[in-house]
Amino acid sequence: MAHFPYQRLQAELSALISHAQSGQRLPSEPELARQLKVSRATLREAMRTFEAQGLIRRRQGAGTFVVGQMAVLESGLEVLESVDSMAKRLNLEVTVSDLQVEGTFADQATAEALEVSVATRLTRVRRVIRADSRPVAYLVDTLPEEVLACDALPGSFHGSVVDYLIDRGDALTTARANISAIGAKSEVARALEIQRGDVLLHFNSKIFDMEGRVVTASLSYFIPGYFNFHVVRRVGTHVAADVA
């Protein structure tokens, strides 16, 4: 019974969202908290559930808006796959916005990630990936300039640096990613039009070529409700039997 008030709140919010038109702005947070007779902190926590499902979007300084349901982008983690490739399977239009390509120099942390010397010239590619015009992912790739020059990306760039390198003929072989749930920092929140602190899926990845060199270090931020990542694994007893 302790959770009943919260379940009631979620049910009332669900009804409010389901009866609203796509693009409609919901009442302000203080007003909605008064209407539903809950604290703003409790309301904010409940709203995050619907935001994670992709049913609402909070825009900094503008309010909370209802969005229409969108097909979930699904991919297995066994194979590195771009958002563009995921979307093509669903015949979903994906576009790139806020593209920034800049030259920079490796600091200590970036040098360690790319296994290069400090002050090595790098190219950094930042962009927002949109599906059905909605921001769903924010991607940042950092590469040695000798792998990708600042002016190398074509005007037809669809958002995946890895796809570009493969199409160019680069022999990429493996990728290693650390996956976590994090709160959105200010830069990422602005790019994805969400609130700072909202939960995101975060991939911190390295991609290697045939010689084991790090080609790119990438940071990927995904709004959870728009993505479904899964992994297929062998059952542990089979592994034990093989070892025996």
Image (tube, helix red, strand yellow):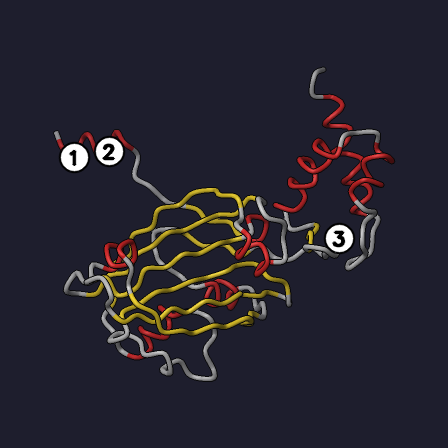
Image point (24%, 76%), residue name: 146
Q: Tell me, for residue 238, which label it has, or none.
A: 2
65 on left or right of 98: right
Is the C-beta separation of discs 1 and 2 under 8 Å? yes
Q: Is residue 214 above or below residue 44?
A: below
Image point (58%, 70%), residue name: 93
Q: Position of residue 124 (x, y in %)?
A: 38, 68
Count neighbours of disc 3 (C-alpha within 10 A) and say few if under 14, some if 14 to 19, many if 20 or more: some
Image point (53%, 57%), residue name: 187
Q: In the structure shown, which secondary structural element does the residue marked by tag 2 occupy? A: helix
- Marks 3 and 2: which is nearer the front? 3
Is the C-beta separation of discs 3 and 2 under 8 Å? no
Relative to the observer, which residue lies in front, 237 or 218? 218
Residue position for label 1: 242
Residue 121, quarter of the rendered image: bottom left
| Amino acid type for the residue under numbered disc 2 | His
Q: Tell me, for residue 63, which label it has, or none.
A: 3
Q: Is residue 235 above or below residue 227?
A: above
Count neighbours of disc 1 (C-alpha within 10 A) and say few if under 14, some if 14 to 19, many if 20 or more: few
8 on left or right of 238: right
Q: Position of residue 6 (x, y in %)?
A: 72, 27
167 on left or right of 134: left
Q: Earlier in the sequence, mark 3 or mark 2?
A: 3
Q: Earlier in the sequence, mark 1 or mark 3?
A: 3
- Marks 1 and 3: which is nearer the front? 3
Q: Position of residue 83 (x, y in %)?
A: 48, 63
Residue 212, quarter of the rendered image: bottom left
| Amino acid type for the residue under numbered disc 3 | Gly
- Distance from Cα at disc 3 to Cα at disc 2: 52 Å
- Distance from Cα at disc 1 to Cα at disc 2: 6 Å
| Amino acid type for the residue under numbered disc 1 | Asp
